[in-house]
Image (cartoon, helix red, strand yellow):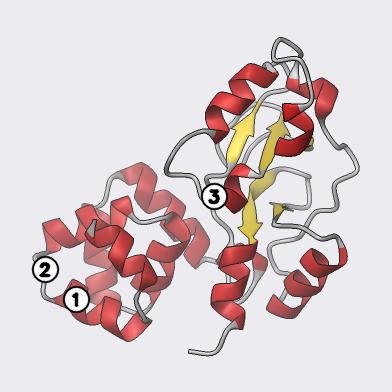
């Protein structure tokens, strides 16, 4: 519950609240936050405290946060979540729909499924395409997700600026967009709610 609350608070309030928690509990709370929000919060902490909390976090969660912190905050890489819905091409549409039903997924994250070659953890194998939830709902549940993907999806690079991301999503009427590296591997996804968080004034 505290992780959910922190994600909605201004940055200075996040830092103040985290400062009143012991380090172990603070690390637990950061693990429960979405990686992009946790990365933004840790970046606002004093370096010594940030390093200590990253050491106390589960290695997998800490690795996601460190990767996001390697990008400038107001870029596609800094805004993206490294945990969109990712499936291999031989998954069925029934499996895809089961994934997007997860109650913790935001509507914008649930709107798109990213179909990639293994490995399925970001950075993944090559991005094959994206499957839109509306398209999946019109297909037979037993069909393969590969039969319903858009292979022409326009992608973002992690160094795309805030303005470039906004123009991209507005141009293509997107609620989410894949972020890929120079080899076409999926690094994460920028969602419209992440974009608005950065565009709206404090």
Residue 182 point in image, percent of width and height: 78, 52
At mark 3, the secondary structure is loop
Q: Is residue 40 visible?
A: yes
Residue at screen point 20% across, 72% down: 18
Which residue is denoted by mark 3 in the rendering?
82
Q: Is residue 73 visible?
A: no
Check the image and report above or below for 46 versus 143: below
Asked if disc 2 and disc 1 are in contact, CB closer than 8 Å, the reply is: yes
At mark 1, the secondary structure is helix
Q: Residue 59 versus residue 152: which sits nearer the camera?
A: 152
Query: Which residue appears farthest toward the front when viewing the image?
Result: 138
Residue 197 point in image, percent of width and height: 54, 74
Q: Is residue 61 left or right of residue 16?
A: right
Rendered image quadrant of residue 130: top right
Task: Count every numbered label the image shows and give the total.
Answer: 3
Circle 2 residues within 10 Å: few <14, some 14–19, many ≥20: few
Q: Residue 193 versus residue 116: which sits nearer the camera?
A: 193
Residue at screen point 61% across, 27% down: 97
Residue 136 point in image, percent of width and height: 74, 29
Q: Is residue 129 left or right of residue 46?
A: right
Query: Which residue appears farthest toward the top when viewing the image?
Result: 142
Check the image and report above or below for 43 versus 30: below
Residue at screen point 51% across, 50% down: 106
The numbered mark, 3 or 2, whose residue comes first in the sequence reads 2
Q: Assign the N terminus to one quadrant of the image.
A: bottom left
State the CA–CA distance, disc 2 to disc 1: 7 Å
The numbered mark, 3 or 1, whose residue comes first in the sequence reads 1
Residue at screen point 19% across, 76% down: 17
Which residue is denoted by mark 2 in the rendering?
21
State the CA–CA distance, disc 3 to disc 2: 26 Å
Residue 17: mark in rendering: 1
């Amino acid at each position: 519950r505290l992780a959910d609350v922190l994600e909605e608070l201004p940055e200075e309030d996040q830092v103040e609240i985290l400062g009143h928690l012991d380090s172990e509990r603070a690390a637990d709370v950061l693990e429960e936050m979405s990686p992009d929000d946790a990365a933004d919060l840790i970046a606002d902490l004093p370096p010594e405290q940030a390093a200590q909390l990253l050491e106390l976090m589960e290695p997998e969660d800490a690795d996601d946060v460190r990767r996001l912190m390697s990008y400038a905050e107001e870029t596609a890489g800094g805004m993206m979540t490294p945990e969109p819905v990712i499936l291999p091409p031989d998954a069925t549409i029934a499996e895809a729909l089961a994934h997007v039903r997860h109650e913790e997924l935001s509507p914008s994250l649930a709107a798109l499924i990213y179909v990639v070659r293994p490995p399925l953890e970001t950075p993944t194998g090559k991005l094959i395409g994206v499957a839109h939830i509306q398209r999946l709902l019109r297909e037979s549940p037993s069909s393969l997700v590969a039969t319903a993907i858009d292979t022409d999806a326009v992608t973002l690079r992690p160094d795309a600026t805030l303005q470039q991301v906004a123009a991209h999503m507005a141009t293509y009427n997107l609620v989410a967009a894949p972020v890929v590296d120079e080899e076409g591997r999926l690094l994460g996804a920028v969602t419209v709610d992440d974009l608005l968080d950065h565009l709206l004034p404090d």
